[in-house]
Amino acid sequence: MKKIVGVGACVYDTLLVVPEYPEEDTKVKAEKTVTSGGGPVATGLTAAAKLGGDCAFLGALATDAAGDFLFSDFARYGVDTRFIQRVQGVSFTSTVLLGLNAKTRTCVFDRGTVSNFPLTDQMKKAVAEADVLMVDGNNLESAAEAAEIAVKHGVKVLYDAGGLYAGVEKLLPYADYLIPSMEFALKITNAACAQKAAEILFERFSPRAVVITMGEKGGVSFDGKKLESYPAFKVKAVDTNGAGDVFHGAFAFFLSTGFGLSDCIRYSSAVSALKCTSTGARAGAPDLQTLKEFLKENGEEAESLRRLL
């Protein structure tokens, strides 16, 4: 069965590269338009698959044109599509404006009509036989059910906590690796800083580790014993959209292959940085050889990757 499975959002993204975010009631010419698959779990799975992971998405896609694209996009990047149900309805879509001058990212989304879908028996079996389950707070009822199955069968649960959606409290206690954005972490804990938020989240939900991502500032991790900060790799960023999703997917991959927390964080941070050098959340995610070369260029030891190449 698949090593990494995911229950969460799969989104059809239209990326518009513009000089700057436009004022209301005006027109602006896009420098570039790119269509791409998106969504935290879905993009994370493609990132893990590009690194060599054995991955599958568990959920539904609409039978509209956007759904056709998303289904084909999974296949293009090596994510197993056999558990995907195709149903009548409207796809989850978003339009993302990428401001070149100020490096901004502005997203307008429509959840469509198929974003909440019950798990089939086949999907439940896939969760029970996996090594890692990825969830992101979307399709919440199914994600919580999958997480409960995962815990029962000793499957590690990685929660990509980017959006503070209503009801996510039911999902948080299942997380073995709770990896929130700084915005999520500060809001849910009312903490003044990421370090304090990490400690509160660990105490409150008892995961194996909390890793708070902070974009170009790196992040903070806490495993109950050691509170550490980690730096971000410096790159010339052209598109940060999906960088967090790619980080989570890489983390799931390295976790599934037996790496420890510090290596999972370091390698995932490098994968995320590389993604930012290309437009499109999935296209920019690197393979293992590209990652190894990037680490070498940055003076980083990457010998532990040798067994995966």
Image: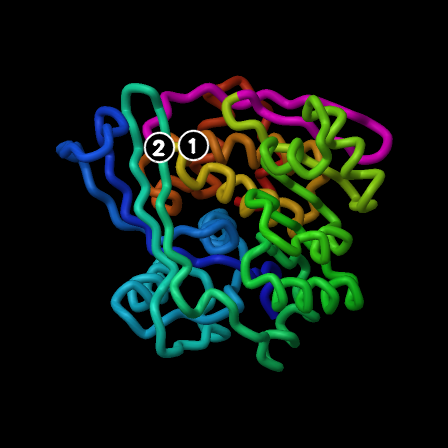
Residue position for label 1: 274
- Under mark 2, the amino acid is Asp
Please name the residue shown 18% across and 35% down the image: 25
Work out whether residue 27 or residue 156 is closer to the camera in this orientation and state it: 27
Within the image, what quadrant is residue 219 found in? Answer: top right
Q: How is the image coloured?
A: rainbow
Question: Which mark lies nearer to you, 2 or 1?
Answer: 2
Residue 43 coordinates in the image, percent (x, y): 45, 51
Work out whether 199 lies above or below 127: above
Residue at (57%, 27%) from the top-left corner? 214
* 46 displayed left or right of 254: left
Please state the extent of the stretch shown in magenta in the rendering. Answer: 217-239
Residue closest to the eye, 118 or 269: 118
In the rendered image, residue 294, in percent from the top left (x then y), is placed at 45, 27
The answer to whether residue 162 is seen in the rendering is yes
Query: Label 2's element?
Result: loop
In the rendered structure, does residue 198 fall within the stretch colored magenta?
no
Mark 2 or mark 1, which has the lower sequence index? 2
Instruction: Tell me residue 52's x, y (percent).
Output: 50, 52
Quarter of the picture containing the N terminus is bottom right
Residue wearing tag 2: 239
Q: Main secondary structure of the magenta part?
A: loop
